[in-house]
Amino acid sequence: MFRVLALISVFTVALFAAGDATFEATKRDLNIPAIIMFFIFVGATLGITYWAAKRTKSASDFYTAGGGITGFQNGMAIAGDYMSAASFLGLSGLVYLKGYDGLVYAVGFLVGWPVILFLMAEKLRNLGKYTFADIAAYRLGQKEIRTLASLGSLAVVTLYLIAQMVGSGKLIQVLFGLPYEYAVILVGVMMIVYVTFGGMLATTWVQIIKAVLLLSGVTFMAFMVLSHFGFSFETLAAKAVESHTLGQDIMAPGGFISDPVSAISLGMALMLGTAGLPHVLMRFFTVGNAKEARKSVVYATGFIGYFYLVIAVIGLGAIVFLNSPEGAQYFTDGKLFGGNNMAAIHLSHVVGGNVFLGFISAVAFATILAVVSGLTLAGASAISHDLYASVINPNCTEEQEMKVSKRAVITIGVVGVVLGIAFEQQNIAFMVGLAFAIAASANFPILFLSIYWSKLTTRGAFIGGLIGLITAVVLVIVGPIVWVQILGNAEALFPYKHPALFSVSAAFIGIWFFSITDKSQRAKDETKAFEAQSVRAETGFGADGAVDH
């Protein structure tokens, strides 16, 4: 194990030695503090992986860290999982570009957490073991439901992973001068090492460290920005209006979402999609009981809510400082160097100099690494636990399941690298949106109704969930982003960018219709089994506890 970690360190050094990209050389001096802090983070996380590997001995350890994570730790890890590069760089970039409308996304991302807290957290922990498919298949047909749940999970994981890999490649390319392909390979290799050797324990602590660093970094940035305006948000906002080319319009809605259908659809995707993301749901099985699961969501909601409030300050601060005469150094040919997503990175240089720029750069990389590790583990568990151990070979041993899981980690890592390189020049903005739409349309309806609706049947869940999955994918393909912007057609067949209003409705209606029309004996047995499921969901009697070490 130690030799493998040493080889990874050597490989990392070799990549940076080879990374004197002309892309960087003509644009920006080599950022030595960023590279030093990057190596400090890499060394620390590899040490954590080595520590976690010695404690990861069973399937429970690998998938859920033995259920031994506390509510506070898990809340911090959930926040680390959720505060992705899209949140940190993307939302601050949106606020910098459009003002108020960027905050609409932040509210959408946040509002999914009360749904999880009040409707799902406790029952998830009481009913599940390793994945959310354990709950959906609790009283329904294992083969059909687990197959569909794993397809939905893998679709979400793949789309999310591509977006994160492309983002990481571009970020490292801009910051360090490393060629794009090498940057993506570096992320892929490191996430494979974290997950394969350390499992959920290593992934959890990488996410906790990243969350602490990110929250500390954005707090310092917001403090420095507000200190220039007497700690008055009103003064900052007034100065942002004065500095932005759109003027007062940045404080009004409608820049991105101009019609009610799109607004409702986007809100549904973000809210219900959060409650259907497999790598987020998986975190509820890492705590010892339902009480700790509820604590997890309370802490996570607090951390994430605070983070999004601070992002508003950072976005407005970027408008003021980067559009000032001193901010001209961050522009090339009239455009912000690295694109609007780099607004927060450039602002970190304004408020904290090269050292703080290095810190934020390393944290941005850590953000991506933590998220892709969680995604990879969720994808591997869908393959090994839901497909292999529950459908293909139900009589397999725990050792066989673990072997399949680790092979799945390597496969997902390789696929992520290949697709990340392949999609370098593509518009990937639709991928995160599609991932949330699939999570909201295929995963959430089945999970929610399996917990709360006694008349749900295997036939209804399978057909309705499949309808939701297919509808979400098809409507995105024939919508404005893919059909017009990527495929080059003149006019979209479906007029809205966000399909969730239609695909989620189709899923719920399909599940309801095909369940109530199912008069088979199997359906009657599944309805009767709801009472026993409900007792366990409410009391936790019979649920798996934490593993003693």
Image (spheres, rainbow, N blue to C red):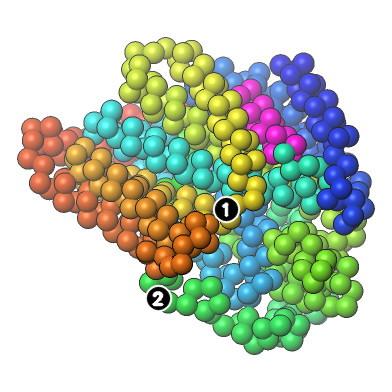
Pointer 1 or 2: first along the chain: 2
Q: Main secondary structure of the magenta part?
A: helix
Which three-letter amino acid code belongs to the residue tagged 2?
Pro
Question: In the picture provided, is 248 more to the left or to the right than 394?
Answer: right
Q: Which residues are magenta?
A: 182-200
221 is higher (above) or lower (below) than 467: below
Q: Is residue 381 magenta?
A: no
Q: Secondary structure at mark 2?
A: helix
Q: Nearer the viewer, residue 125 or 244?
A: 244
Quadrant in which the C terminus is drawn: top right
Q: Secondary structure at mark 1?
A: loop
Which three-letter amino acid code belongs to the residue tagged 1?
Ile
Residue 369's x, y, as percent? 67, 40
Q: Nearer the viewer, residue 499 or 57?
A: 499
Residue 537's x, y, as percent? 31, 40
Residue in view at x 83 percent, y 25 percent: 10
Label 1 neighbour load within 10 Å: few <14, some 14-19, many 20+: many
Question: In the picture provided, is 29 more to the left or to the right than 236?
Answer: right
Q: Which residue is the site of mark 1? A: 428
Residue in view at x 53 percent, y 70 percent: 104
Q: Which residue is the site of mark 2? A: 260
Label 2 neighbour load within 10 Å: few <14, some 14-19, many 20+: few
Residue 368's x, y, as percent? 66, 45
Q: CA distance from mark 1 to mark 2?
A: 24 Å
Tell us which disc is closer to us: 1 or 2: 1
Residue in view at x 75 percent, y 36 percent: 182
Question: In the picture provided, is 481 more to the left or to the right than 540?
Answer: right
Q: Quadrant of residue 42?
A: top right
